Amino acid sequence: MTMRVGNGFDIHRFGDDPDRPLVLAGVVVPGTPGLLGHSDADVVAHAVADALLGSVGLGDIGMLFPDTDDRWRGADSIELLAEVVRRLRADGWRVVNVDCSVIAERPAIAPHREQMRERLAEVVEAPVSVKGRRAEGIGGLGRAEGIACLASVLVERDR
């Protein structure tokens, strides 16, 4: 059985539009401003998509869904992730597991962790873990200027 590992990273800064929702792992998190981005700026879905694409050498999220293309303006990043999973499956791969670390001073991840985990697992059809981490006041993330996510994935050849 052929197995591969991938890692992904994404970061977005908070916006100042009070009507823009914060979306993390496909879950709308109330009480915190949304992130700036061409799509819905879901850093978790983006990091997972990049990890999956990188694991099998299919490029990256910016190549498939460039921010220079208006088709992707305001896109639901969970739908983009689902398309990435479809491409992996078409290429003969299946996701074994996903592990995410969300780095944020706000919001607290723990109250939303299970819903995030379930939403991602539904899309990738594999076990997912989601952990919240703080930047301990260091740099822009520590000053709560945005949110970042690191994702690691394991995939295996399905055929």
Image (cartoon, rainbow, N blue to C red):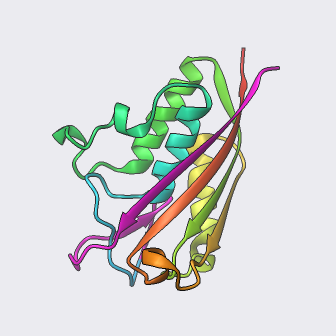
Quarter holding residue 90: top right
Residue lying at the far front in this picture: please name it.
139
Q: Position of residue 148 (x, y in %)?
A: 49, 64
Question: What segment is highlighted magenta in the picture?
Answer: 1-29
Q: Where is residue 52 in the image (x, y as percent from the top left)?
A: 57, 37
Residue ID at (41%, 65%): 23
Judge from the rendering whether residue 83 lies leftward or rightward of residue 118; answer left or right. left
Quarter holding residue 67: top left
Judge from the rendering whether residue 144 lies leftward or rightward of residue 115; answer left or right. left
Residue lying at the far left in this picture: please name it.
70
Residue ID at (46%, 55%): 10
Residue ID at (55%, 70%): 103
Count of picture labels: 0
Q: Which quarter of the rendering shows the N terminus?
A: top right
Figure check: 147 above or below 90: below
Q: Which quarter of the rendering shows the C terminus?
A: top right
Residue lying at the far top in this picture: please name it.
159
Judge from the rendering whether residue 4 lies leftward or rightward of residue 136; answer left or right. right
Residue 64 part of the magenta-drawn span: no
Quarter holding residue 20: bottom left
Q: Position of residue 143 (x, y in %)?
A: 43, 84
Q: Where is residue 51 in the image (x, y as percent from the top left)?
A: 57, 41
Q: Nearer the viewer, residue 35 or 137?
A: 137
